[in-house]
Image (cartoon, grey):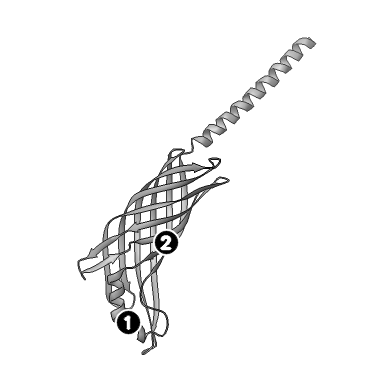
Amino acid sequence: MKTKLLLLSVLLIISMRMFAQEDIVIDVKQEETKKVNFGIGVAYGFFNPKEINDLVDNAFPSEDMEYGFSELILNIVGKVNLNYNVSERFFITTYMEYAWAPKFMTDESSDETFYYSFNRFAPGLSPKVLFPFGSGKHSFFFSPGVSYNFMNFKFDDADFESTASNIGMKIQGGVNLQVGKVKMQPYMAYDYANSKDDKYDLELNYSGLQMGIDFFF
């Protein structure tokens, strides 16, 4: 009887260990098969919308301004991303990006403050190739992509609003850093977004450099 109990105990212990190992394997596979990552990002863009800047400069000469300058050179960007992991080294990223270029200025002669803005909304698609380095935990990445840009330039205190839309592109490269379960991707990018508003015959050009960081969870 004691021999049977001992044999039963040994078999029970072996079964429990096998079940525990099986659970571990299942957990690892579930982690490996996680295909989709949600992400958010922020960036600064540097650009020169020449026709818009010329228009504003003619309307508000620098000598009449109490402070600052009229030209638009900087925009602020917010992004929402969705990564689909095709393989360890190849992702497909879809994103929605909103860029805001606000401007406030005060006319010295009238002491009146004016506000105008040049904004862009751009959904896009971007394949991303990773090049691991070191231990392989981190990697460089290169990502060419396409976007569709909806652009809008307006004065809030005047009856003037110019809109245009067109297909553009975004080329970016950076570093993919794995920090725990979070991917951090600082990057530099070049955006091409340029279209003509037929109503005012005005070029809306949002092309320029961008520096930012994305976080994927």
Is the residue 25 above or below the residue 117 in the image?
above
Taking depth in this image into account, of 113 and 170 the one nearest to the observer is: 170
Q: Residue furthest bottom?
A: 109
**Are the residues flagged by discs 2 and 1 in contact, CB closer than 8 Å?**
no
Q: CA distance from mark 2 to mark 1?
A: 26 Å
Name the element at disc 1. Answer: loop
Measuring from the top left, give residue 161's x and y in whole percent.
28, 71
Question: With 84 as the anchor, is 198 left or right in this view?
Answer: left
Residue 167 at x, y = what percent?
Answer: 27, 55
Residue drawn at the location 32% of the way across and 82% of the way down: 60
Please tell me whether mark 2 sits on a helix, a strand or a loop: strand
Residue 15 appears in the figure: yes
Please tell me in which quadrant of the rendered image residue 92 appears.
top left
Mark 1, residue position: 60
Name which residue lies at 47% across and 47% down.
Answer: 140
Q: Residue at x 29, y 70 (%)?
A: 50
User: Could you say which is closer to the camera, residue 195 or residue 54?
Assistant: 54
Identify the amino acid type marked 1.
Phe
Quadrant where the N terminus is found in the figure: top right
The percent position of residue 57, horizontal first and vertical second, equals 31, 78
Which residue position is annotated with label 2? 77
Measured as percent of width and height from the top left, residue 30 is found at 52, 34
Number of numbered discs: 2
Residue 90 against residue 199 in the figure, above or below: above
Q: Residue furthest right?
A: 2
- Residue 59, quarter of picture: bottom left
Marked residue nearer the N-terminal end (2 or 1) = 1
